[in-house]
Image: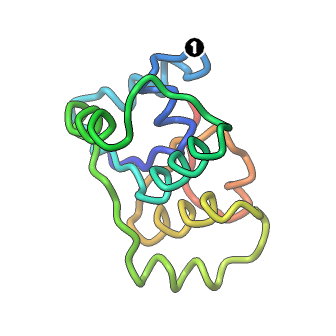
Amino acid sequence: MRYLLDTHTLLWFLQDASELPSSVAARIETVAAENHVSIASIWEIAIKLSLGKLRVPYSLDEDLPRLLEQNAFRVLPLRYEHLQLLSELPFYHRDPFDRTLVAQAQVEGLLLLSRDEAFDAYGVQRAWA
């Protein structure tokens, strides 16, 4: 299965947080899983760190790339196809990072691992179990 991890999913997975359901962690850890992390999520983390709204026990410049590689997470860049769809999406969700994830999941045919039910209005495939 091919997944796109929402930002909170990535953060909770890397910190082994209790907020992440064990069933979602199991999906991510399955050998056959192809896990993607959007560059938009990394951007969102960087912004929240700089504003003091987020603290993580690793650095963005050295530790995070190593953690992504150790977990075989693929960083999904922003492509023109993603931005084209993003420009056409209705504003069911106001968060620009989340709207970017919707566009990327739809264009790439990825199942979005997120607890955010607001994604459902877009008809994106989403799971949180």
Q: Which residue appears at 46% of the width and 76% of the height?
A: 82
Q: Which residue appears at 44% of the width and 72% of the height?
A: 107
Name the foreground residue: 125 vs 71. Answer: 71
Give residue 3's position: percent from left, percent from top. 39, 47
Corner quadrant of residue 88: bottom right
- The colour scheme is rainbow
Residue of label 1: 18
Q: Is residue 75 above or below residue 25?
A: below
Give residue 25's position: percent from left, percent from top. 43, 24
Q: How many marks?
A: 1
Q: Is residue 29 above or below residue 62?
A: above
Corner quadrant of residue 26: top left
Q: Residues within 10 Å of mark 1 (few under 14, many from 20)?
A: few
Q: Secondary structure at mark 1?
A: loop
Name the foreground residue: 88 vs 54. Answer: 54
Quadrant where the N terminus is found in the figure: top left
Identity of the residue furthest to the top in this view: 18
Q: Is residue 41 above or below residue 88?
A: above
Q: Which residue appears at 50% of the width and 32% of the height?
A: 11
For residue 34, side relative to residue 48 (left or right): left
Give residue 63's position: percent from left, percent from top. 29, 33
Give residue 95's position: percent from left, percent from top. 71, 60
Q: Is residue 49 above or below residue 102?
A: above
Quadrant where the C terminus is found in the figure: top right
Q: Amino acid at mark 1?
A: Ser
